[in-house]
Image: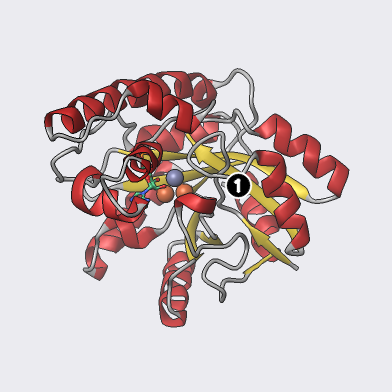
Amino acid sequence: MVVDLHAHSTASDGSETPSALVEMAVSRGLTTLALTDHDTLEGVEEARAAAEMADIDLIPGTELSLDFDGGMHLVVLWLEPGPGPLQDRLASLQEGRNRRNATIADLLVALGMPVSIEEVAEEAGSGSVGRPHIAAVMMRKGYVRSVAEAFDLWLGAGKPAYSGRPRLSPEEAISLAVTSGGVPVLAHPHTLGINRSHEMAQLLTRLRSAGLVGLEALCAGYHRHEREGYADLATRFDLVPSGGSDYHGAYKPGLELGIGYGDLEVPASVVSQLRAHARAS
Ligand code: AMP
Ligand code: ZN
Ligand code: FE
Ligand code: FE
């Protein structure tokens, strides 16, 4: 029994609709899928309806970008749509995105690569609008050859068309997640940019005492020794070793739901561990 606890749909920067994602999960033999669109729960209703038809467990969730040098992402699982402390903050996070996107569009105009907010909105459809949508418009207009190239040359942190947006602090996000009934999981920890083990230990101690429940050890693109290393780390800090593909469809070519780059396998036991651990903390 295998699961995928990190995936994006058209409700943020994935290319597949929530129901298509659920169907894909079923055809891949997954028993549980978590929908974790950036800063939104907009896709949950559609995904849940599709999951009920198809007999697969759907975990509603979201992924937040936090205020941390180098970048920190938090996946929040079992976050239900509707009112709630974190749910209520998602709207302002989206406003921050929209303001940031307008700034990026202005920068691109100044750099001689005009991209309008209308074109980006059309690319994104409903839900959270992000840099991958801007990258897709840049690709269509012939400014870059791929989404990855758009990030490498222009949109990534520190590049000429980069602009930041307001982010929650790690403590604030974890606390909001927990008081909203969600289960916070530190996403793809390699992107923290921490190489020294004592720094990682300090950070995990800090996040664990704030209420962190899981850490993604099973990520696409990790070598086996990395998965084992992060799983050991999770165990040392009393965190559940979670994981998922971080599937984005056409926005991240080559990455597949459930299996990542072909060798990913997240056991279903992780789901019950996350649930039990969340209740126990
Ligand atoms: P945003 O949320 O709008 O700030 O955009 C960040 C999102 O862009 C990330 O969550 C990824 O989905 C995607 N992303 C970041 N870096 C890259 C990259 N180098 N290539 C493709 N997608 C990326
Ligand atoms: Zn994304
Ligand atoms: Fe992420
Ligand atoms: Fe993600």
- Is 217 positioned to the left or the right of 183 in the image? left
Residue ID for mark 1: 278
Q: Nearer the viewer, residue 242 or 155?
A: 155
**How far across and how far down the image is residue 183, in percent?**
56, 43
Q: Quadrant of the N terminus?
A: bottom right
Looking at the picture, how far across and down is residue 125, in whole percent? 52, 28
Residue at left offset 20%, top offset 33%: 108
Viewer-side residue, 33 vs 273 = 33
- Up-down relation of residue 6 to residue 83 (above or below): below
Instruction: Kindly identify the residue that appears in the image at 51 percent across and 34 percent down.
Output: 177
Residue at left offset 29%, top offset 62%:
200
Residue type, label 1: Ala
Residue extending furthest toward the bottom? 225
Toward the front, the furthest residue is 142
Quadrant in which residue 42 is drawn: top right
Give percent across and percent down for residue 137: 37, 38
Q: Nearer the viewer, residue 136 or 204?
A: 136
